[in-house]
Image (cartoon, rainbow, N blue to C red):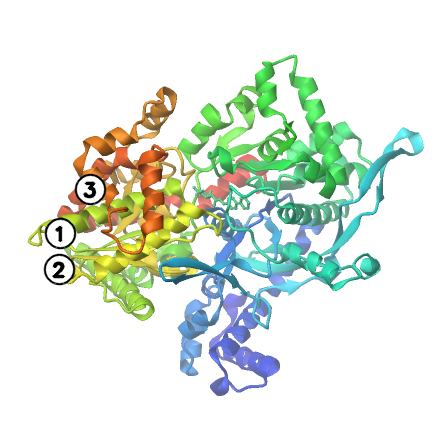
Amino acid sequence: MATDINKAQFIKDFKDQLYEDFMVKNSDATAEEQFVALAKVIKNYVRPDWFRQKNGIVADKKKTAYYFSIEFLPGKMLQTNLLNLGIYRMVEAALAENGVALNDLVAAERDMALGNGGLGRLAACFMDSLATIGAPGFGNGIRYKYGLFKQKIVNGYQVELPDAWLSSEGNVWETKKPHSAVDVKIYGNVYLEPHDGGVLKPVYENVKTLHAVPYDMPQIGFQNGVVNNLRLWDVEIPEKYELDYPTLADRRRVEDITSVLYPDDSSREGQSLRLIQEYFMVSAGLQTIVKSYAKMGLPMTAIQEKVAVHINDTHPAMAVPELMRILMDDYGVKWSDAWTSTIAVMSYTNHTVLSEALEKWDAALFKEIVPRIHQIVGEIDRQFVAKWASKVDACVVDNTRIIRNGQIHMANLAIIGGHSVNGVAKLHTELLIEDVLKDFYTIFPEKFNNKTNGIVPRRWSQIANPKLSNLIDDLIGKGWRRDIHELKKLENLTSDTAVLAQLDLVKTANKQRLADYAKKMLGIELPVNAIFDVQVKRLHAYKRQLLNVMHIIKLYQDLKANSELELTPRVFIFGAKAAPGYHFAKSVIKIINELAALVNNDAEIGDKLKVVFLENYNVSLAELIIPAADVSEQISTAGKEASGTSNMKFMMNGALTLATLDGANIEIKDAVGEDNIIIFGMDKNAVYDHYQKHDYNARAIYDNNPEIKRVVDAFVDGTIPNIHYEGHEIWDALVSYNDEYFLLEDFDDYVKKQAELATLYANDKQTWQQKALINIANSERFSSDDTIELYAKEIWEIN
Ligand code: 26Q
């Protein structure tokens, strides 16, 4: 095992690698070269364990779970890999002895950002946790040439640039496996022709064949010798079918398939390239899985005993008809047996209750691109309707069938074609059952279950926050680094004033680290004695960054009206990408930046209020920002945020959560107790009440509440310069269009709770740190190791 490597051996391996790849001496090498060499040395160390796990699937006939996700968002891998191998300190020291700072090599790695946000990051946490609990669980996705766009702020506006994350070296962690390539067919016509014994076999005409080539990345478990595999597919033009793609434009259209990750833009649907991406990764992944199952020499009809396939949101939902296709067309399994197996193999996680975000495809487009899959989906739908029409209400069948009004409903396909549907927090699962998927619940109650999200504790404590980690070592020993539940022991120390003072010092140091970054990026000086109040997440109306903005405007107006006003100094920090086509979200970004310019340059305001928008929020920036937060803003309209996961990362780093009763915030409240979280606003029942009664009247609130009127009018009355257009758009959304996300109703309580926490911070730092410590202690409840253990036992039945 790699843990056996000593310093001398390591340094020899490192220098040999530098020589082999770049023909340079260590002393002449750039940080990039050193990073590449180090990564390759690590890969060499894990290769035996990795190889054994991959080959063990067939050799040991172990049941394996395959996590299908169109997004994986690991960020950087160097520190995680060193930590998980148990050689972090050794390597750091060995490099230092040779004049190399590990941190420079960490900085040289590029973020692997093949995901939008929560869903992709969750997939990455799950890969780490699967290896860490020692379960055979492999990832299946797409090797995008460009990850999520890089965000620049120009003139206050978001500008998107391509994220060319693959350096000339490619991705150093991956290994290309041309040997395991498979062909994927799209387009053309299909018809069924009877064969011997009357079996119908599909005949394809004019198809386009794509060559799917896998790139494998090791997923290293935490100090346990287990290395799982993340397989990402790239497309190539098969030599055999070269004549099908004669022109350069034809070839480019093929390359486009794995070229870019689609930004989360639920409003813009129906892009055929996205559908091709989905089918491409699903077909390539499943063909490989079935092939390796076939090698076990077991009956094809028992595939569910060795294979579990997880559908992460609906994007890979074509796994259902594709497995049917492979079993029937390639292996001659009859429909009814194939269907029994498919249901037993497949399971699905839902990540949203927003109806506009539920994936649908135009049936005609679907038929054009994946004609055989379209046939199979048609038959699944026909049989579903035939089976249930006589048993349940017509409207239940109508709401649950797959094809309706010329559209294919991907969630319906995933639910009907699998044995498990889970939400990602208790409230979210309840809402699926009571509301969004209630008709499904009447038909298949046994399929529904909850799996509250989690976060990989190592990255979000040990790696992101070394200072806090060292303090925790001093307080309760190092055992928590292996067993996160030991963090609970910190609860015994909440009355130890010396401990609370140390905690405060650590937080201040982390705030300074972030302040240095802000100084470098924006040239702004952030006072570290101020409350660092942070909202970092994708920009979405339902996440209500605008409510945060309204509060800042209120404070600004108060200060302008009375410069003597006692106010706890506060730094508001934002990080958020908006989908390129999401107009409203982009306007909010512009407004935040203009408000920041106004507030930060007002001499009367001074250090009492600062507002910063940090561009290009990504995993690496999260690792810098989250440890520096005093306040974690989790302020979505109740019922809208499926779970949230940054909320868990913040608490693990000692921020106090200011939250609505939404998603996992509710479970955080249960974990820390209501004295150690700040809850405000309407709960889900209050929100649903308004929906039912249609009685929400934003205009009335605006007319009757002078403070709210003053704040809302600031968007249009010139208070904030340079937002003429955006300000009117926002004003209209809040007043003319009846404030869809209830910002005005929640505003007063939000302001009140903000004031209370500011008073506490100013007057009783000790109580504040006590609450912070309780948050850290109880963050152990949100380890993705435990979440994945439940998936493994209850859904996949592996392990
Ligand atoms: C839609 C249409 C076209 C192209 C892309 C998309 C698209 C892409 C990504 C739609 C949605 C997503 C991502 C959704 C997501 O990240 N959801 C979050 O999942 C987290 C993990 O479960 C939860 O914690 C969050 O609450 C949820 O918002």
* Type of the residue with mark 1: Leu
Badge 1 crowding class, 10 Å Cα cut-off, few under 14, some 14 to 19, many 20 or more, is: some
**Residue 332: x %, y % from top left:** 83, 36
Seen from this angle, which residue lies furthest right? 196
| Disc 2: which residue | 604
| Residue matched to label 3 | 710
Separation of residues labelled 2 and 1 (CA atoms): 8 Å
* Residue at the limit of the structure toward the left, as seen here: 564
- Residue 554 lies, in percent from the top left, at 19, 46
Task: Check disc 3: other Cα within 10 Å, few if <14, some if 14-19, many if 20+.
Answer: some
Which residue is rendered at x = 16% and y = 43% of the image?
Answer: 756
Pick the quarter of the image with the C terminus.
top right
Question: Which amino acid type is marked by label 2?
Answer: Glu
**First in residue order: circle 2 vs circle 3:** 2
- Residue indicated by mark 1: 559
Q: Earlier in the sequence, mark 2 or mark 1?
A: 1
Q: Amino acid at mark 3?
A: Arg
Out of 681 and 304, give the one closest to the viewer: 681
Residue 791 in the image: above or below residue 599: above
Q: Position of residue 297 (x, y in %)?
A: 78, 44
CB of mark 3 near ligand 1 (< 8 Å):
no
Q: Residues within 10 Å of mark 2 (few under 14, many from 20)?
A: few
Q: Secondary structure at mark 3?
A: helix
